[in-house]
Image (tube, rainbow, N blue to C red):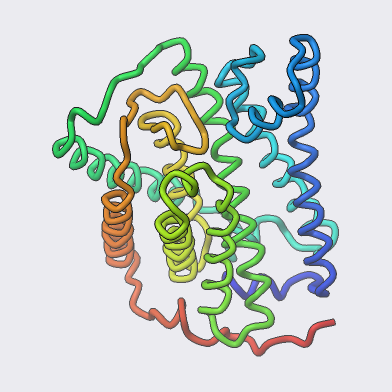
């Protein structure tokens, strides 16, 4: 039913192109406050364009007096703009309800979102405790109450919008759209997972840990979230997991190579990406097993089998 929601409204190929352009320009629009504040601050301090470009790449604006939490909020506004672009395209161009990107039913199941959020936080914390038990000297406490509580406000308001934007675009809009012209469900699953990984190609972690390791993580994450979306026939579980991942990382554990620096409670001195990959796949397997048992998932053709509707002709 979830993929079939793409059959509603209007689905000419050019509508997808226009909506993707709207999403792109939405993110640009969302970056304008950061851009103008950077120019204003930099001009007053005599900062060069090269310095501005370097700060924009590192997302560290403290050299020109922009606090870490305020800078993070400005960066995340890009995703708010992209989300508005997606909403406009779906509602006014495709003539579809925005809710159809999340669920085929009349109401969003918020309990499912919060359940996935809570379970993933618990699993992440379990893996973190295992890491800590093996390498306690790798963790240091950097808790600063004033900075942390400001970070918490920014994180709880804007990170769910950022993660929801990525889920709605990849596991919602694109997965549903690609299913219209594919015979098998694994096609949109693989394409959107690869695209999700490539979107993170410019992240600082790629330079620090290598493209092979980081793309294994990001594409693997896309596959995991895509599989549970197709099995559950809704985006709600993926929304909860993605929000839990980013909020936990922002508030509780950070490291130097992270693409977004925050005033988290703990700081890791070094990161073993091989161990982190293993931990992620173990947590993903446990999550999938528990939710499959809870919801009675048995028909795995929902991930890889044929799409219930024949492909439509491109217009």
Where does the image place residue 115, in percent across and percent down from the top left? 38, 48
Q: Which residue lies most toward the left here? A: 133
Q: Nearer the viewer, residue 284 or 111?
A: 284
Where does the image place residue 263, in percent across and percent down from the top left? 44, 22
Q: Nearer the viewer, residue 156 or 191?
A: 191
| Residue 263 in view | yes
- At x 74% / y 53%, what residue is drawn? 86
* 79 versus 52 height, above or below: below
Judged left or right of residue 81, residue 251 is left
Q: Nearer the viewer, residue 244 or 51?
A: 51
- At x 72% / y 59%, what residue is drawn? 97
Q: How many marks?
A: 0
* 251 versus 309 height, above or below: above
Where does the image place residue 83, in percent across and percent down from the top left? 70, 46
- At x 66% / y 14%, what residue is drawn? 64
Could you say which quadrant of the image residue 179 lies in? bottom right
* 254 versus 21 height, above or below: above
- At x 81% / y 56%, what residue is drawn? 21
């Amino acid at each position: 039913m979830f993929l079939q929601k793409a059959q509603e409204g209007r689905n000419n190929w050019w509508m997808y192109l226009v909506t993707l352009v709207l999403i792109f320009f939405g993110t640009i629009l969302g970056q304008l406050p950061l851009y103008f504040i950077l120019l204003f601050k930099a001009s007053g301090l005599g900062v060069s364009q090269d310095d501005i470009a370097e700060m924009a790449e590192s997302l560290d604006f403290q050299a020109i007096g922009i606090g870490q939490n305020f800078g993070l909020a400005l960066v995340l506004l890009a995703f708010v703009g992209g989300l508005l672009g997606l909403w406009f395209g779906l509602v006014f161009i495709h003539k579809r309800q925005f809710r159809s990107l999340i669920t085929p039913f009349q109401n969003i199941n918020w309990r499912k979102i919060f359940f996935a959020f809570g379970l993933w936080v618990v699993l992440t914390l379990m893996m973190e405790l295992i890491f800590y038990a093996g390498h306690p000297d790798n963790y240091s406490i950097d808790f600063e109450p004033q900075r942390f509580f400001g970070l918490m406000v920014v994180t709880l308001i804007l990170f769910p919008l950022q993660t929801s934007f990525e889920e709605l675009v990849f596991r919602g809009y694109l997965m549903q759209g690609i299913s219209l012209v594919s015979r098998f469900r694994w096609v949109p699953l693989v394409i959107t997972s690869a695209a999700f990984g490539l979107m993170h190609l410019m992240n600082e972690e790629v330079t620090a840990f290598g493209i092979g390791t980081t793309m294994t993580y990001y594409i693997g994450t896309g596959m995991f979230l895509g599989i549970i979306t197709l099995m559950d026939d809704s985006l709600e579980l993926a929304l909860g997991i993605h929000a839990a991942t980013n909020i936990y990382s922002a508030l509780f554990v950070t490291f130097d190579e992270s693409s977004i620096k925050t005033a988290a409670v703990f700081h890791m001195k070094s990161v073993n990406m091989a161990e982190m990959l293993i931990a992620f796949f173990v947590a993903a397997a446990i999550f999938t097993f528990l939710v499959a048992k809870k919801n009675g998932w048995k028909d795995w053709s929902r991930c890889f089998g044929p799409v219930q509707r024949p492909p439509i002709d491109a217009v």
